[in-house]
Structures are given as C-alpha cells and as structure tokens.
Amino acid sequence: MAPAAPRLVLGLLVLSLSCEACEKVIFRVPSELEADTLVGRVDWKECLQSAEFITSSDGKFKILEDGSVYTTSAVSLSDEKKTFTILLKDIQEQVQKKIHVSLVKEEKKTQTQKTRHARDTVLKRTKRRWGPIPSVMIENSLGPFPLQIQQVQSDTAQNYTIYYSASGPGIDQDPKGLFYIERETGNIFATRAVDREQYPSFQIICFATTPDGYSPEVPLVHTIRIEDDNDNAPYFTQDVFEFCVPENSKPGVVVGKLTAEDRDEPDTLHTTLKYRIVSQNPPLPPGFSLHGDTGVITVSSPQLDRELVSRYTVLVEVRDMAGQPFGLCTTGTAVIKIEDTNDNAPSFKQIHYETRVEENRVNVEVLRVSVTDLDEPGSPSSGAVYEIIRGNDDRSFEITTDKNTNEGILCVVKGLDYESAKQRILVIAVNNEAPYMLAPHSQQLSQSTCSVTVHILDVDEGPVFKPCFLRLEVKECEEIGTNIGRYVAEDPETGNSEGICYRIPPGQCNWISIDEKSGEVRTVKVLDRDVGEMRRGQCNITVLAIDRNGKTGTGTIQVVILPGNKNYPRIIKTRYIMCTDRKPICLTAQDGDESPYSMPFVFRITERSLASSWKITGHNENSAYLSPRGDIPFGTYTIPVSVTDNGGRVGENYIEVQYCECVTPTECRSSTRVREGGNVTLGVWAILAMILGSLLLLLILITICGCCGSGVMHRQVADDCANHNLIISNTEAPGEEVMDHNVIHLQNTSDQGGYGIKTGDQQTFEMVKGRGHTLESVKGGGHQTMGSVKEGGGQTVMDTCRYSYSEWHNFTHPRLGEKVHLCRQDEEQKHSEDYLLSYNYEGKGSLAGSVGCCSDQHEEEALDFLDQLEPKFRTLAETCVKR
C-alpha cells in the first residue's frame, strides 16, 4: 500500500534493464531525501513474474507491489553514490533474483545553464499556469473530419509547434497524421476515426516557442481519451462445450460452466453479459437449467436415464447490455453426455441348462451361460460376475467370465466319480462388477439365477488306493523283512481288490517292498537314521496298482523312521588333571540318539570302594561334576562311571584323574601311586607266563652256583658265592631295620640269624647265611620240600651251594603245577597275589644309577648319592634312610 500523502520528487531513470539485464537500476536524486519520498519505480515483473516476496536489503527503503521505491526515513547521500538490493523470491518454483539499485546525486548546473535560468527568470510570467482537462473522442466517430478536439493558448508565445505521441496496447510508434495543431490558433484536430480497442487514449505533448526558437513555458501534456462504443458482440471461449453427468442425478447437480468474453470497455453495459438456453435436443424431457449471470448449467430433472437418452445437445445464447433486446448477442453449443450407472441388473437368457461330462475329467469346459444387461456394454456396470451358490460343496466346479463375450464358462476342476453320483445339479447366480445404484423412481433389484444339470458319464477306470497317501512308521534298526503295514487298492467298478497286483517302480529309495498279491509292506534293509539317505528320516514311495485290464492307479507311501535307542551314552573326555584346589571335574556325555532316547543323563560311580571316596553331583541334562569326598593322597585314579540315557541304555566309562600337587594342570609333572582299596588281579595265562619266567631264572641261578665248586652236595661255599646271588636283608642300605609281617624267623645255624620268605600258608625254602648255605625243609601242610626229596625225611640237610637239575626239578615241578591248578580253579584269582605285586610307574631313572648298588657298598656310611635323587625317589629315600 502506498504511503499517505507522499511528496513527489521527479527521479530520472537513467538505466533500466529487462529480465535478462535487469540486475542494475540507477536513479538520480537530490542529496537529501525525507521520509516517505518516492525515489522511483522498477519493473520487477519483467525480472520475475511469479515473485511472491519483494524485500530490500536496506531498511531505509521499501518497495510496493507496483514497483514504487519509497524511503522509510530521512536519507542523506554523503557519498556520490548509494546502492542497495531488491530481492525477488518465488518459493514454489524455488527461484530467486536480485535487482541492484544505485542512487546518484543530481549534477550541479553549469554556467550556461545558470545564464539560461537567469533569462528564464526575467521572461517567466508570474500568472497561474493553465492546464486543460482531458479531451474525449467518440470511438468510430462519423466526423466530419478534421474534427476539432481542443485548443491550447499561450500569452507569451508568438508561434506554436505541436508534437504528439500515442500510448495503448499494440502501439509501437506514434500514429503520425492522426492529429495536428494549427500553428496560429493552437487548435488540435483529429484527421480520422479511432478504434478504442486499438488506441484507448492518446497523450499530446504541446510546445510553445518564440520566433527565435526559445520555449518560455514548460511543454504541456494533453490527454485525449477514446470513449467506447458498443461495437463488439460477446463471444464464447470454445466452439463446443462438452460436459458429463451421471444418470439419475439429483436436481441442482452442476453439469458445467459456459464462459464468454466481450472486447468492449470493461465494467460497462457494453460488457455486461447474460446467458440463456435457446433449445435442447432431444427436447423432452427438459433436464437442464442455465444461470443467466454465471453461465453455470445444472440438472433440473431427476429423470436422466442413459438407457433412454445418452446425449443432449443444448444451444445457448449470450447477450451484452445486460441481456437487453438491443444488445449484441452470440450463440454457442454445449454437448452433455449422460454417464452410465449400474441401475440395471443382469439376467440369464435361460433359467435351466443341461450338459454332460465324463468322470475323472479335469480342467475341461462343460457349459457356457449368457446374460443380458441394459447398462453400457464394456463398463463395470454391465460386466458380469458369476457364482455357484448351490451344489458345489466339494469345489469340483468353477465358473469364470469371458471378458470378450461376457459369458460364464463352467469348468470341472476336480475329477467326478460316476459311482458316487451320476449327476450334479448346480445353481448359478450373476452380479455386476460395479455396485448397484437405484434410480429414485425404480424398484429394488433382484438377483438373477439359473440351474445347471450335469450328467456324469461312466468310464472304465483304474484301481484307486484308499487312502491315496499312506504314512507308515517303523522303528529304527528293525530287522530286515519286518511287516510295517498293508497298502491295497480297490476297483471302482466292483468295489473290491480282486485281480489287482502291486509293485514299486524303480528309481526310488529302496527301503521297503510290497507283496504283489496281498499289498503287505516289508522292510528290505535295516533302517538306520545315521546312514546315507536315511538321515532325512523319511521317504515318499510311489506304488502302482494294476488291474486285469491293464488299468493302473497310483498311491504314495511315506515311510517315516522313528528314532530308536541304539547308541550308548559316552563321556566325551575321560582324562583329567586335578590340582590341590580340588576343583570339581565337569563330565559331559553325549548320545547319538534323538529325543526321547538321549538326555537327560544319569551319572553314577559303579565301584563301591571308589564311590566312598568320590562323588558325582548333577549339573544339567548332559553333564555332572566329579569331586573327591574328602582328603585323598596324590596319584592317578581310574574311576568307573556309568551313564544312563533317558531310554535306560547304560554306557560304561572309565575316568582317569591324575591328582597332583600343583596350582594349574600344566604344572603337574609327576604322578603319585594310586592307593585304592582293591588289589590288581591278572589272568590265568599272565600268571602262567610269570611262573615260567621264574623257572627260567631259577635254572640260570643253578647254573651259576654250579661254577662255585664240584658236584658234591655237602660242600662248604665261600661267602663271596652267596654275596653274588642273594642278599639276606630286607633293606638296601644301613639304617632302621624294616620288617614285614610276611618275613618269619627260621632256626639259627650260626651267629647270624637267617630269614625266610613266607608265601601265604604254603611251604617254601630259605638260604641261611652262616658257615654255609643250605636248603632246609620246613614242616607244614604235608608238602614235599627240597630236603625231603633228597633225604627222604623232614630233617635239615646242609648243602654246599649246589644241587643237580633233577633235584631242583623234582622240588619245583609238583609245587608249580599245584599253583597253576589253583589259579585256574579260583575265579577271583587270589592265589596269584602270592607271586605278583603291581606297582605304579615311578618316573625315569636317577642320575645316581641303580638302587641295587647299595648291596655292594663295603662302606656302610657311603650314602651320599641319596641326596642327589630326583623328587620321584624321595619317598624311597625316606624309607631307606631315617632322617
């Protein structure tokens, strides 16, 4: 909005660019500008026609919608030039442009201009200036021409010269010769008629000059306005207007709007238009009305029926002068098309149909039905949708629509059985794709139906398996030939299985076989879910049934292998190391079977003697903790643990636990002897091998003793002879005497007592160190000894360290035979304990050499080598020497 009462300053526009070159505008203004002063105008529409926001970069200036630039406060041009920017924005199109405005001070007048101004001051009249009112010229005036328009006068001018110019739409240059002025009188004349639509007004610039060419007055601008004449008739903007309206529309529904224009002067009676309907084709019934001022066509009758009249042609008139009879008028055409609505229901051409089809035929067309519909063909209002509403409970039939003919196609999608039903009666209904829209005067629509009788023709068909899919379950690892079921087919004609044979086509998994006559199904291999293709656990096998006529039928057997309890549960890891912290050992078991024959597992120590010192604590379904009940010595323990799965299958496992004096298992470098409550037993053949080895050792000993003297029995032997054979001592070094309850004292034969070795309750022999070595019989048990063989009695015989082979053989053979006999008879093999004692492995050898060297030491106190033994022999050293 323009500011109130602005003071006008004539700003001289020096440069104004077009849209492509409108980025810079220069105005020449005084050096001092007051507030609300018009600086000039810019044509921003040529730069950006669609600009929505116009802003100034300098708050001292504002821009109005017409492009006027005003000051918002007092502005002083201290410099020669002041610039700011006008910003144009189009938000929708995202376009932005700028206009640069420069304000330049007005130049000072030169000396010549000052002199001319002095002359003007002298010659200028002081009376009030005359300003003529605008002249009026009638459009298309009939004359006579030249026609006087106005007269201008000047008191000071002797001669007059006139210059003229024209402004208006479509004018590129002044119409020369249209006006002229009399030099002497100043009268302005028009030379011919003027069309207002071409030149709505003219501006004549009049100059008054003196004979010497000087103009004492400012040029006078005179406006000549061309008054409009109603010389243009209104016209429609289109040759033919086309509209659409649905049938059965209610009165008042807008159909469309007619538009017309008039080239005469706007906002006058010459351009005030009125519309009316001249005619309608067909004339009846009259269905439309036209608003006289706006040209809007509306429905006037509710009885628009497309089936009766599908198109209306309306002739319309438009007249200016507000529709007065003397106004100019024009006619136009409007074509109104009635759109179809679904106000008519489809109906069958026949109410009953009959057809035939062979049994077991599938996806075959059996019948076509057709309907009539008054709605527009090809539209959703006439498109038929068919539906079987009765007689198709088993979904054997299907009906679809042929889009080209709009017919219903009835097909069989599931094979029919003549033996079950010889005919089928169907009821078919029809609807439209579009919903129904009832006319105001119509009644409720009813759905059309028809009945179809389908006769089924009998056909000789092959056997049929009942059921067509049979599931047979068989347990895993059943024996070959196990009967797992029976699969038979029937002849649909006879209803029995006589004359039908069965076989399995090749190329399938060969798990089962079927009896050709009876249809019994048996396994042909052991079904194991862990072997080859049986890992899937099931297999589908197609079976053929063939009747006497060669007709075949097929069925499917699904063999499912049920998981069995065929695997023993076992502990995954059986060797462990336990340190001094005695952290429980986690035993984890696994079973190759599936549920319910696998987890949960039950762990148990099977040996009672170990169950008293070790315990098992449950952890989860497949693991348990093994830990000692109390303090136990270091060593290696073999613990029998049984694992029972959920199916009751028991797996025996032996857990080896090495209990070490360590902090972490990696620090365990030695193993200790296991101290368990039971003894180790050996087999009969192992004991026999040990005894035979002992006999061989005795024979070698006899041979060595034979080297010490002649073959006389009662011979004195030197002390050295015995020293190299047997050491009569339980110790291997001087120290505390260690005695065993198995060693008994015998009769002393010298100053030094002798010792014998006791073996259970049986009789044995001894070598007595004294003046000589003898073999003496010891009474007890009535068994024969070496002495009794030689002397024939129980008296002691003093030998000389040598006996013959026959004597040794007669002494040892019956005794060893008795021992072997007892070992064979004793299942617990307790007699073998008299000969063999088991010891655990004690590590690698010592740097000190064999311990046997202790018996050859002549100096009783030379035991320094015991200090150099490795830790594995410390226990032995503590036994030999008392610290």
Image: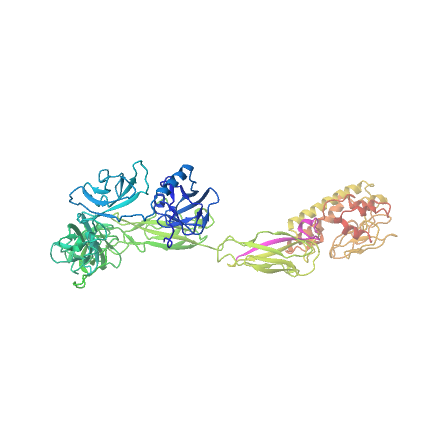
Residue 122 in picture, x, y percent from top left: 37, 42
What residue occupies the far top of the structure in this picture? 212
Q: Is 653 inside the magenta-drawn segment?
A: yes
Residue 247 falls in image quadrant: bottom left
Residue 431 falls in image quadrant: bottom left
Residue 169 in picture, x, y percent from top left: 26, 43
> Is residue 685 among what the camera can see?
yes
Q: Is residue 658 left or right of residue 713?
A: left
What residue occupies the far left of the structure in this picture? 283
> Is residue 717 among what the camera can see?
no
**Height in image: 634 above or below 714?**
below
Q: Is 181 inside the magenta-drawn segment?
A: no
Q: Is residue 678 left or right of residue 248?
A: right
Residue occupying image coordinates x 17% and y 54%: 321
Residue 777 in picture, x, y percent from top left: 79, 53
**Height in image: 327 above or below 190?**
below
Over which residues does the magenta segment extend? 649-671
Question: Viewer-proximal residue, 274 or 283?
Answer: 274
Q: Is residue 362 left or right of residue 531?
A: left
Residue 280 in picture, x, y percent from top left: 13, 54
Question: Viewer-proximal residue, 561 or 364?
Answer: 364
